[in-house]
Amino acid sequence: MELDPKGFMREIDFSRRNLTVKRLDTNQESRVLYAIIKKNNAAIHVPKLPKAHFSVSKISTTRKLIDELNNIRVDDQLYSLLEAVADRVEMHTNIRKQRDNWNTLLLNSINMITLTAAIMAGVAAIGGAGMPLLALKLSSTLMYSAAIGMQLVMNKIQPSQLAEEQRNATRLFKQLWSQIETMLALGATTEEDVKDMMERVLALDRAYPLPLLGAMLDNFPAKFELATWWPSHQLLRKKTKSHERKQRENNGWSEELEVEMRDVVEVVKRKDSKDYERLGNLVLKINKILSISGPLLTGIAAVGSACVGNGSWAAIVAMAAGALATSANAFQHGGQVGMVIEMYRNNGGFFHLLHETIEATLEERDLEKRENGELFEMKVALQLGRSLLQLEELARKSASCFASLIEYSVGPIGKQFSYLVFYKSSIATLEEKFRRVLEKKEAVQQSVNGAQWNQEVVASEVNTWLTNVEKKIEEIQKFLGEDVKANRMCLNGWCPDLKLCYSLGKKAQKNTQAIIQLLEEGEKYDKSVQHCTSIESKITIHITV
C-alpha cells in the first residue's frame, strides 16, 4: 500500500513482473486502514507507563512573597516609630528652651525682688517714723514673702535640672532615630526589631517625662540614683546579625578578649561608677541645703523687715538675711546645681549601661549569638574615648592596680590599714571572683561528667580541685550571707564598727586570693580533662586492635 500524490491509497501488486496499481475507493481505504491498525495492535504490545503526578512546587515562591509582605509591614511600623521619635525630639528641644527660660527669668526676678526688699528695709530704718515707715516696712515684708513663694516653687521644680533632662532626652532620641534609619537602610528587619525599638522609646519616655504634674522625677531622692533609659531585657536580646562577616571560628572572641572585657568592667564599676555616685551624693546634699537655706533666710529677712523701727538689729537682720538669701539663690540656680546632679546621673547611667552590656555579652555561652568580638571591643573603646591599645593598657593595669596599691604603695603596715579603708571594694571584688569560680566549677564538672559517661578515667587532681572548690564555696557563701549581711543591716553605713570593717576587709582579701588560685588551677584542669579523654580513647582503640 502507498499513497498517491493526491492522498488516495493505492494497492500495488508485486506478484507479477509488470506491476499493476489499483486505485481503491473510500470504503476500501477505511477497511484496509482498520485491518492494518488491528494487525499492528496485535503484533506490538507497549506496556502501560505508571501514572506519575507532577506538581510544580510553589513553596519557595510563596514563602518569598510572604517574607516580602512581612518586610513591607515591618518597615511601615518602623517608619511610624521614626515619625514618633522625630516628634519627641522636637518636643524635648522646645521644652528644654522653655525651662532654660524659666531658670533665667525666675532667678533674675527672685534676686531683684529680694534685693529691692532689702534696700527698702534699709531705707525704712533710716527714714524715721510715721506713714512712710509703715509703707516701706509693709512693702519690704510683702516682697520678701513673694520671694519666699517663688523660691519654694523654683527649688521644687529645679528648672536647670529639668532643662538638662530634656537635653539628654533629645540626644538619646536622636541616637535612636539614627539607629532606626540605619536599620531601615540595611533591610532584613523583623518583628523583634519593632518590639525592641518600641520598648526603647517607652523606656526613654519613662526616664525623661515631658509633663511636670504627676510624672516629674523626684529631684530630692533619699539616695542618689543613676539614670536608666533602657529596657531591662534589652541586653539579653542583642544578637549579631552579621554571621557572614565572621573573621574567626569563634566569632572574633578569644579567652584573652574575655579577660580584657572583665577587667574593663571591674575598672568601670570600681572607679567611674563609684566616683559619679559619690559626687552625685555630695552635690545632692549641697542642693538640699541650698534649697532649704534660701527660703529660710528670706523668711528671716521678712520677719526682720516687719520689725524695723523697733531697734537697729531688726534692720541689720532684714538686710543681711536678704543678701545671704540672694547669694544662696544665685549660687544654686545661677551655678545650676540641679543641672550638675542630672549630668552626674546621666554619666553614671552611661557607665552602668556599659558594664551591663559587657556582662550580658559575656554571659552568652553561644559565641555565634554574640556580637563580633573585634567589633564589640572597638565599640567599647570608642565609648570610653580610647584607642584599642589604650583599652588593652587600661585592662592590663587594672588587673594589678589594686594589688599593687596594697603591696607596694602602702607597704606592710599600710596593708593592715587597707583592710579597713577598702573593705567595701574588697567585698565587691570577692563577689565578682566568686561568680567566676562558680562558672569555672560548672564547666569542669560538665567535662568530668562527660568523661565518666564515656567510661573514661579522670585525673585525681581534678577531683581534688572540685572538692576544694566545694569547701571554699561553702565558706564564702557563709561569709557573704551572714557576716556581710549582718554588717549592712546593723550599721547601714552611718556609724561603722571599725573592728568589724577591718575583719571583713581582711577576710574578703584572703578569700579573693584563694579564689584566684583556684581559678588558675581550674583553667588547667578544664583542658586536662579533655586531654586525658583523648589519650584514654587512643589507648582503648590500641588495645582493641
Image: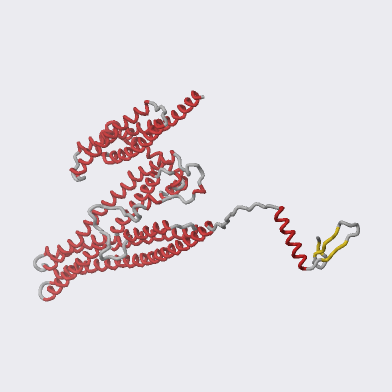
- Within the image, what quadrant is residue 505 found in? top left
- Vertical arrangement, residue 249 with respect to residue 181, above or below: above
What's the residue at 48%, 44% (across, down)?
Answer: 251
- Can you name the residue that lies furthest to the bottom here? 131
Question: Measured from the top left, where is residue 109 in percent x and y?
Answer: 26, 68
Residue 366 x/y as whole percent: 43, 44
Is 241 positioned to the left or the right of 440 in the image? right
Residue at far right of view: 18
* Residue at image coords 27%, 67%: 106
Give the position of the N terminus as an image quadrant.
Answer: bottom right
Q: Where is residue 128 in the image (x, y as percent from the top left)?
A: 11, 72
Q: Which of 161 and 77 is in front in this view?
A: 77
Horizontal arrangement in the rendering, residue 391 relative to residue 470 (left or right): right
What x and y, as percent, mark residue 437? Answer: 34, 36
Relative to the observer, which residue lies in front, 34 or 342? 34
Farthest residue, direction left: 310
* Rendered image quadrant of residue 409: top left
Does the rendering let one see residue 161? yes
Q: In the rendered view, does 217 fall on the left or right side of 378?
A: left
250 or 514: nearer the eye? 250
For the rendered model, the colour scheme is: secondary structure
- In the rendered structure, the answer to whether residue 47 lies left or right of residue 506 reads right
Query: How many marks are shown on the rendered structure?
Result: 0
In the depicted structure, whether residue 124 falls above or below residue 62 = below
Tell me if I can see residue 331 in this picture: no
